Image: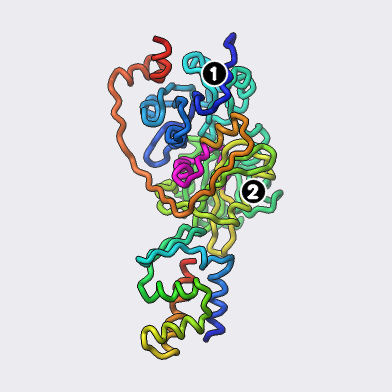
Amino acid sequence: MIEKMDTLLQRICVDGRLAKLAVSETGFIFDPQTGQSFTLNQTGLLALDLLKRGNSLEMTAQYMSDEYEVTMDVASSSLEAFLYQLGRYL
Amino acid sequence: MGMEPRIVQDWRRWNVAVTGVNAHVESPGPGCAVARCLRECADFKGTVIGLGYDVLDAGLYARDYCHGGYLVPYPSAGKEVLLERILQIHEIERLDAIIPCLDAEIQNFIAIKGELARLGIRMLLPNRMQFLLRAKDHLGAFCQSVDVLAPESRTITNPAFFETCEAEGWEYPFVVKGIFYDAGIAHTAAEARLIFNRLVNTWGYPVLVQKLIRGDEFNLSAIGDGKGGLHGAVMMRKRGLTEKGKAWAGVTVVDKDILEMASKLVKGLSWCGPLEVEVMKGHDGKIYLIEINPRFPAWIYLSHAAGRNLPVALIRTLAGETDLQLPEARSGTFFIRYAQEIIVELPQFESMMIDGGIPSVETLLNAS
């Protein structure tokens, strides 16, 4: 699963796009390249923040598993769903 | 014609005339936005004169944007009549520069550029060849020559094409475009004929058909230096469209692929003057050129809001500045267009109808 997610993440991160996203603590996100804006809930915001800081998918899933007290499997599949969603906006 | 040239070096004190000051809600001319950019530049202490084609062009009376306003003859009247009228206005307002803002008038202004320059009136315009190369009916060939993608287009003069087009690989829907302005998406032959007739009645022949690209619309405005360089690019993604497909809302973006395409086009044309590059980012991920407009766009006020006031950059260029040092345009600056009424008192309207203009207060004060 992590391998598939890595490909997804690589696509989203092309040309540093993830790093360039303007992120507000309210969950409002603006993509300066496409002009697209969208909102994230607190869980999505945390995942995006971790990924933007350069954490690997495994580290991000692990952090979320600890934070929300869910199994690593649940955290990983949630992260995968999140990345798919995010990819639709970038 | 015995007028002495007026040479004022400091652009901050210039009298600048701006055309295209109509403000129709559906499709406003760029003139009011250009004038607003000049007026809201803190350094600019000169006057802005609106030049309109119709007594109902709002910019003629909008004192927040234009200090004065004058009617000019329609482009179809030709260059001699335009020159004569500009000279009349110059006698009153002592113009230093003109910023033409409508496609249909640019060729006339190109033709009289030399005469106006001799009087000290400056304009930053392409030459006739550059202007024609980017015209809708030559755009496809030009794009091929500079390796830029453009949707397949075809010039047509006979609407019978709409009955046979599918056999020639032109499946509906596709875009039907006027030679200067206006376009519509045709889903059937009947719809295509209606759009065709409307465009011919308004803009004349020929009409263009263009294959429809589905995706997101982006526009870029900048200034070409005439030597292949592009300066001051500001990019915008359309966020809301009118029925005519014009942006009524948009947001500044920074996209290096669009900038690269525009740079290629400006270099290929050695474009001189302001321009707008309209592109479509297709769902296939590719960028297609839709049009190159030979002027600032109606959304140009966004350039001022994003920190890169392009009309001011243009007059600084006309004043001979070569190192403009423009700040980066901020991404994430939105505009939302709205309509507002300007109140015009009867004497003002009468002046416009009878005298063809209302001088700027500055001119009236100097005269008294």
- Give the x, y percent position of residue B96: 54, 23
> Considering depth in this image, is B308 or B223 the residue closer to the camera?
B308
Residue drawn where x is 42% and y is 35% of the image = B40
Residue drawn where x is 57% and y is 11% of the image = B3
Q: Mark 1: which amino acid?
A: Val
Q: Secondary structure at mark 2?
A: helix
**How has the structure been colored for display?**
rainbow
Q: Mark 2: which amino acid?
A: Ser
Q: Which residues are magenta?
A: B291-311
Residue drawn where x is 36% and y is 26% of the image = B61
Q: On the image, numbered disc 2 is attached to which residue?
A: B263
> Considering depth in this image, is B308 or B277 the residue closer to the camera?
B308
Q: Which mark is residue B185?
A: none
- Give the x, y percent position of residue B133: 66, 40
**How would you rate the neighbour count of disc 2 (Cα within 10 Å): few for under 14, some for 14-19, many for 20 or more?**
some
User: Reading the chain from its start, which is encountered first: label 1 or label 2?
Assistant: 1
Q: On the image, numbered disc 1 is attached to which residue?
A: B81
